[in-house]
Image: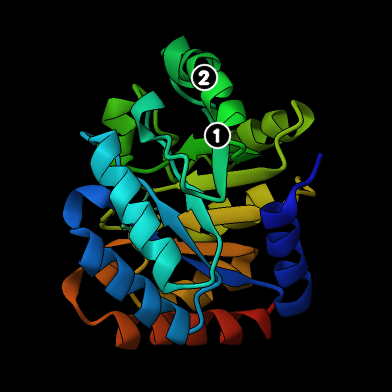
């Protein structure tokens, strides 16, 4: 069943063609820093806040980061979990995600089995998503024991995405890894986009207006940026990326 946050995202994509989501890594911020980032990102046109990182996390710290963001902005807060400790009862929704190209069943279905009862208990809205790590893959690739899909194999990314859609996942995420030197290339975004019907999320290494424009004009429906908001110049950087997304849409 499609919940309120998913409906909000789908409506926004329908109306605006492509949207931006700000990722906040709870390991990198204090709760006041997180709420300041969220406020500035909202003012710059971001559509939702994702909270999550690839490595160590204390659920208590995560809870206070999420609570503080919720108090500061009226945007949906969606968890982006790397494990079962990344589930906060204070969020609105959770990407209920499976790392489709992991070699370890734990990241495909194991953590999900452990986390599902908590998601239900906390009344979090699960949004089924197929997560595919590509390129260098970064920390997420190492932690998730993924076989990152090389950039010159777009057809393999497309096959993973299609399998995710056929399994019922309602979003597909192409992840280059946080801080990736090279974001997901256009050919790979195009190859995935043309064979799926569900929205396509693209993230990892997107730092500029041109990079956002390039990803959106190739078919990305959601652009996620994290690193660019950790340097204090949130407003400028997010505004620039949102502008790139708007221009990219006119080229699709
Ligand atoms: C990482 O795709 C996200 O999971 C965002 O990446 O931090 O490089 O923006 P950046």
Quick one: quadrant of the N terminus? top right
Q: In this view, does 61 lie above or below 114?
A: below
Q: Residue at x 32, y 36 (%)?
A: 140
In depth, the one of 208 and 90 nearer the eye is 90
> Can residue 189 be seen in this snapshot?
yes
- Mark 2 Cα shell of 10 Å, populated few (<14), some (14-19), many (≥20): some
Question: Which circle, 2 or 1, is nearer the viewer?
Answer: 1
Mark 1 secondary-structure assignment: loop
Q: In this view, does 177 lie to the left or right of 11?
A: left
- Which badge, 2 or 1, comes first in the chain's sequence? 2
Cα distance between the residues tagged 2 and 1: 22 Å
User: Image quarter for residue 165?
Assistant: top right
For residue 248, which quarter of the picture? bottom right
Q: Judge whether residue 184 can be spotted in this image.
A: no
The quadrant of the picture occupied by the C terminus is bottom right
Query: Residue 122, which numbered label?
Result: 1
Residue 86 is situated, as x and y percent measured from the top left of the image, at 37, 35
Would residue 191 be found to the left or right of residue 153 on screen? right
In which image quadrant can residue 157 be found?
top right
Residue at position x 71%, y 74% from top?
17
Tell me the residue that label 2 is attached to. Answer: 108
As helix, strand or loop, the secondary structure at mark 2 comes to: helix
Write the residue at 38% across / 78% down: 39
Residue 126 in the image: above or below residue 18: above
């Amino acid at each position: 069943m499609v919940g309120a946050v998913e409906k909000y995202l789908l409506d926004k994509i329908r109306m605006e063609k492509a949207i931006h989501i700000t990722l906040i890594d709870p390991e990198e911020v204090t709760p006041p820093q997180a709420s300041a980032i969220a406020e500035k990102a909202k003012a710059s046109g971001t559509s939702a806040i994702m909270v999550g990182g690839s490595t160590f996390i204390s659920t208590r710290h995560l809870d206070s980061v999420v609570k503080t963001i919720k108090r500061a902005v009226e945007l949906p807060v969606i968890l982006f979990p790397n494990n079962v400790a990344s589930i906060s009862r204070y969020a609105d929704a959770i990407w209920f995600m499976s790392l489709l190209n992991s070699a370890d069943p734990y990241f495909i279905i194991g953590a999900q089995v452990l986390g599902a009862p908590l998601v239900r208990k906390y009344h979090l809205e699960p949004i089924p998503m197929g997560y595919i790590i590509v390129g260098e893959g970064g920390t997420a690739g190492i932690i998730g024991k993924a076989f990152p899909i090389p950039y010159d194999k777009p057809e393999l990314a497309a096959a993973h995405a299609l399998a995710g859609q056929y399994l019922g996942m309602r979003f597909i995420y192409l992840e280059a890894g946080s801080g990736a030197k090279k974001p997901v290339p256009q050919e790979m975004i195009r190859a995935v986009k043309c064979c799926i019907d569900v929205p396509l999320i693209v993230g990892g290494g997107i730092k500029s207006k041109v990079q956002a424009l390039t990803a959106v004009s190739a078919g990305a429906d959601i652009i996620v940026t994290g690193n660019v908001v950790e340097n204090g110049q949130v407003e400028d950087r997010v505004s620039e990326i949102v502008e790139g997304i708007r221009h990219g849409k006119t080229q699709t």
